[in-house]
Each structure stands twice: as structure tokens, then as C-alpha cells.
Image: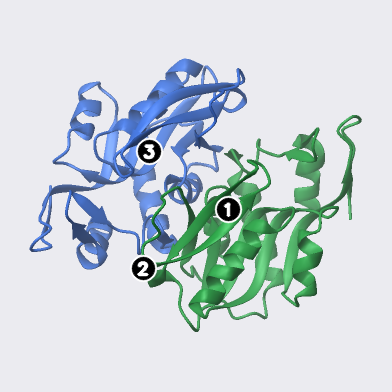
Chain colours: A green, B blue
Amino acid sequence: MKVLEDYIAKYGQVKPGNVLKVDSFLNHQMDVSLFNEMGKEFKRLFADTEITKIMTIEASGIGIACIAAQYFNNVPVVFAKKSQSVNISSDVYATKVESFTHKKTCDVIVSKQYLHKGDKVLLIDDFLANGCALRGLMDLANQAGAEVVGIGIAVEKGFQKGGDEIRARGVHLESLAIIESMNAETGEIKFR
Amino acid sequence: MKVLEDYIAKYGQVKPGNVLKVDSFLNHQMDVSLFNEMGKEFKRLFADTEITKIMTIEASGIGIACIAAQYFNNVPVVFAKKSQSVNISSDVYATKVESFTHKKTCDVIVSKQYLHKGDKVLLIDDFLANGCALRGLMDLANQAGAEVVGIGIAVEKGFQKGGDEIRARGVHLESLAIIESMNAETGEIKFR
């Protein structure tokens, strides 16, 4: 998606350790005009897909998911919660997700009330790197008997394995911008 | 706001310990149509206020803040992050917030890049009980030299002290629904 690539090229900062900072418009400060363009593009990419629910994970996916929902007939948006509690209650589905940014594992939960058999779920998130968060969300959907009919990502790090692994499972995954390579020394970012 | 009170009366659940569960439409599953009605109402209530930025705190405030921003000329939305890190870097403003729900204190941070002197900030959050989160956000704005020109809350627990304390400071605080009392045994909810 040209406009998102332009934002990344203009405002993104490449940091050592394969970190791409896009927090001026995507995941700390949020540009809602851009999110609307992204929502329209997700609708175009998943126009032929029946979607009954959008699911994301706190925190950075929530804004994108809510704005996008407006282009999908305002379907309910559910965000999976990162839980620090030792005891997982019986009224939630739970899975474990390893965070690339924070180098730690956390429990991720969703209430059984808001994810059901028969739900056709579009997963939305801001970033896709190694795919841990997405695999966690897919696991939650699977536990509920819900079907993941699509995945919409803002920025995919194409040089990490997450995206290709998930596509190999046959899931319809669309990333609005895919970083082919980036260089912390020169700041250069190449898109696929 | 009638429509929000109707949602609370219909879908809200009163639990022991002054807990009001509204996670079927507000803070776990999210009803984006309702959020749009709330956004319009915030605009009506703050129509005469110049606002250059919306600030909220992760995670439940983010969706409401992003949808609301659409009614305020798509001003940037910044969400303060709850940090578990021991070391607070010098490029963020930091404060401490005690969570009513989780009974613990956490550091809340916002990048100095996204909050400045001269910013006229509308704070938005899903809940107001004892006001700890809001006081934390006001402290962050104060550190940055930004001005909090208004606070928009979805649900205020009027029987806790947070709202009255903040109004007593002279801040323009608007809550779309104020719970006067609630009863976990009967499930009854009275609005102010």
C-alpha cells in the first residue's frame, strides 16, 4: 500500500536489532486518517470474504482494528488480553505468546463469551515479525471452533519467517507493507 | 447519554466489589457503532474547545479514542503505555498509576516526542472510578507543559470519588454515563 510505505519511508526509524520504530503514526501516536486508508484497503483485499468478527491483541492492534471495523459493517471487535495472572479462569480461552519486543512470554486470553464456533474471524494487527502473536490468536480461535478467514497486517518484516510460515498454512494473509530489508546504519528501508 | 445508559442497563453486569462488567461492548468486545455515537457526543460536549491531541491509556481507551478522533478533525491520538520495565528511559515522561481492577501500581509512560508544550489535550478513557489513571495522564501532560483542556469518559462510577475530585480542580470533565449506585445482589443500576 503506497501511502503506508510512504509513511514508513518518511517517519520510520531503523534501530539496531531489527527494530523498526513507527511509533509516530502507528503504535504509540496514531494517525487516524492513515488508519482509515488502511481500513479501506483491508476491505478491498477481503471484499469477497464473509467476516463476522474482527480480533486483535492489545494494545497496538486495537485502534487499527476499530477503525477497520467501520468498513466491515461495524462487526464486533474483540481484543485478546495479555494476562499477568497466574490463575487462568475457566471462562476464557488462553494461549502463550512470546513477545519479540519484550523478549518474554505472556498468557493471552479471550473470554469464551466473545469467540464462538461459527465466527468467521478477521485477525488484525500492527506488526508481523516472527508471527508469535498471530499464532496465539489463531490458537484462541481454534479453541473456540471459530474460523480465521483472513489476517490483515499493517507492517510485515518480510525477512523474518512469520509471514511465510502462516501463508504456508493456507491462511489468507495480507500485509499492507512488507519490509524486504532494512539497515540500521544507513537507515535504508526496502519494500517487497 | 441515553444510548450508552441503555447499553449498560441491558448488557452490564454488576459484580461483587463494586465491579461493573461492560466487556460485551466497551472494553473487551467493542461495539464500534456505539463508539461512533460516543465520539459524536464528545464532539458536541467539547464543541467550543480547541483540541490538538487526544490522549488515552492502554488498552481499553484506545478504541474509543481513535473513533472519537474522527469527530475532532483526526487530531493525533497518543496512548500512554503501561511499562513493566525497571529502567525508565530519559526520552519518556513517566508517572505511577494504581489500578483499581488489578490492585497494583505500574509505571505509565509517554514518549517526549508525542506530547509537547502548547498541546491542547483531550483525555479519553473508558472508565473513571477513583481517578488514578486520569491523574496519571494529567501528570504526564503537566510534565510536558501540555494543557488538559477536557476529559471525556464513557462510564463514571459516581459513587467513587475520582470524578468529583477532578471536577473540583476546575477541569472540564464529561462522563457519558454516571452510575449513581449499583447493587450486586439485585443487579440494579441507577444513573445520576
Q: Are marks 3 and 2 in contact (CB under 8 Å)?
A: no
x, y percentage for residue A115?
46, 72
Residue type, mark 2 in image: Asp
Q: For the residue labelled by badge 1, is the local secondary structure a helix, a strand or a loop? A: helix
Mark 1 Cα shell of 10 Å, populated few (<14), some (14-19), many (≥20): many
Q: Which residue is mark 2?
A: A91
Residue sitting nearer the eye, A124 or B166: A124
The residue carrying mark 1 is A61
> Numbered disc 2: what chain?
A
Residue type, mark 1 in image: Gly
Q: Position of residue B183 (x, y in %)?
A: 10, 56
Above or below A5: residue A24: above
Image position, residue A122 (x, y; %): 60, 70
- Label 3 belongs to which residue? B47
Give the CA distance from mark 3 to mark 2. Answer: 42 Å
| In the rendered image, the vertical position of residue B125 relative to residue A95, given as above or below | above
Side of A47 where B171 appears, left or right: left
- Quadrant including the C terminus of chain A: bottom right
